[in-house]
Image (tube, rainbow, N blue to C red):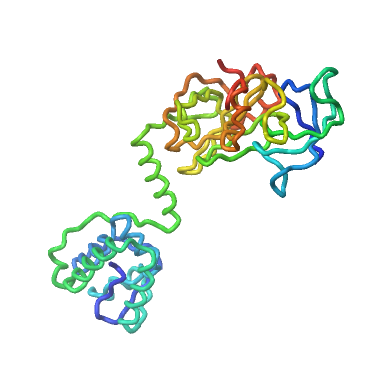
């Protein structure tokens, strides 16, 4: 709630603010889906300022534990905008993404990513 | 073991750590004490807390010189308690073997005293050492499969990791070690690197079986144990080709 996240695809938005975490009582973590409101957008883009969109958290400054005992954390909070079915709106994804997304079935985002951390 | 008391009804509680006795009469006694010795059986003795009970087969004057407090107690109950206490803690096969040794030893102590050779007294394992010993064993077991190099903060390392999710090839992680947390088998190192413009920190358990190789590529001179200041510095300092 109220977390401002960076948008790392080319859907047109620049910053979104989280208004709801879809799963989890304590908030969304790396790999979860959120509902967000676009706060800042590029002038000609697929989404405009003020639009309510869904997003998948691809980078989080909070560490996420993996089942082998390792943990991963990024330096910023970033999100990729998706539609209700989970398909990304943009056509490119910038920056590294964790491979937790594979387990969450966001395979399309993984294929578009530059680097899988 | 030492807790197996002879049919005589006296228990001795030493005020200080018992040294091997010199007098001939006590030879069996000291050998008796030092038999406990293999790490597991010794732990049996100290855990129960009854290690103060010693067999009485020797003259009381020797014991008196050592400053023992002699207490009369009925035997069978005492022994039963000793057994009960030690039962829960030890490995059954070692215990059974030690008990068999001990009982044979105890009965024949008077006769065997003269023939027993003096054995060096082996150190006892205390309750607080058990986790350390288990950790050391686990580390040795993991080292046998894959040797782990000595890692320090400031090393630039390359880690080859097998991820069951990826299943294709080994993932390679390169970066600088910014911290090392020592916790026995769960010793972890934190690797930092700038990937595609974003800083990423990953914590790896060093002795994990998923890690196929750890290689120290370079070393950077640092004057700290934890390099958390790198997070605020220029990305150039955390970039490694």
Q: Is residue B105 left or right of residue A1?
A: left
Give above or below for B148 relative to B107.
above
Give above or below for A92 relative to B203.
above
Q: Is residue B222 left or right of residue B130?
A: right
Give above or below for A15 relative to B132.
above
Q: Quadrant of the N terminus of chain B?
A: bottom left
Q: Residue at x 44, y 30 (%)?
A: B150
Give above or below for B4 relative to A32.
below
Q: Quadrant of residue B106?
A: bottom left
Residue B135 percent across, percent down from the top left: 42, 46
Q: Quadrant of the C terminus of chain B?
A: top right
Picture mark count: 0
Which residue is situated farthest in the bottom direction here? B74
Q: Quadrant of residue B72?
A: bottom left
Of residues B17 and B7, the one nearer the viewer is B7
Q: Is residue B113 left or right of residue B155?
A: left
């Amino acid at each position: 709630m109220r977390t401002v996240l960076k948008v790392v695809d080319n859907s047109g938005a620049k910053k979104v603010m989280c208004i709801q975490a879809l799963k989890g009582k304590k908030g969304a973590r790396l790999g979860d889906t959120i509902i967000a409101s676009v706060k800042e957008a590029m002038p000609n883009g697929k989404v405009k300022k003020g639009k309510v969109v869904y997003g998948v958290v691809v980078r989080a400054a909070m560490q996420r534990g993996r089942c082998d005992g390792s943990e991963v954390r990024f330096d910023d909070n970033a999100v990729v905008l998706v539609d209700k079915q989970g398909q990304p709106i943009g056509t490119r994804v910038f920056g590294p993404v964790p491979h937790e997304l594979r387990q969450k079935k966001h395979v399309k985002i993984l294929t578009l990513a530059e680097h899988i951390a | 073991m030492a807790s197996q008391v002879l049919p005589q009804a006296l228990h001795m509680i030493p005020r200080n750590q018992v040294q091997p006795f010199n007098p001939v009469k006590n030879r069996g006694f000291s050998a008796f004490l030092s038999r406990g010795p293999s790490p597991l059986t010794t732990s049996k003795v100290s855990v129960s807390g009854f290690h103060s009970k010693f067999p009485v087969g020797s003259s009381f004057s020797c014991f008196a010189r050592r400053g023992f407090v002699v207490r009369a107690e009925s035997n069978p109950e005492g022994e039963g308690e000793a057994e009960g206490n030690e039962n829960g803690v030890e490995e059954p096969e070692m215990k059974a073997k030690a008990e068999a040794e001990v009982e044979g030893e105890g009965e024949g102590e008077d006769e065997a005293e003269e023939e027993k050779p003096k054995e060096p007294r082996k150190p006892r394992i205390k309750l607080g050492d058990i986790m350390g010993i288990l950790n050391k064993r686990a580390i040795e077991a993991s080292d046998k499969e894959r040797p782990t190099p000595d890692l320090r903060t400031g090393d630039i390392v390359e880690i080859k990791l097998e991820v069951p999710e990826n299943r294709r090839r080994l993932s390679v992680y390169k970066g600088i070690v910014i911290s090392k947390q020592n916790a026995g088998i769960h010793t972890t190192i934190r690797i930092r690197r700038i990937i595609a413009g974003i800083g990423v920190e990953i914590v790896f358990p060093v002795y994990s079986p998923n890690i196929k190789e750890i290689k120290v590529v370079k070393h950077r001179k640092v004057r700290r144990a934890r390099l958390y200041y790198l997070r605020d510095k220029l990305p150039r300092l955390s970039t490694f080709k």
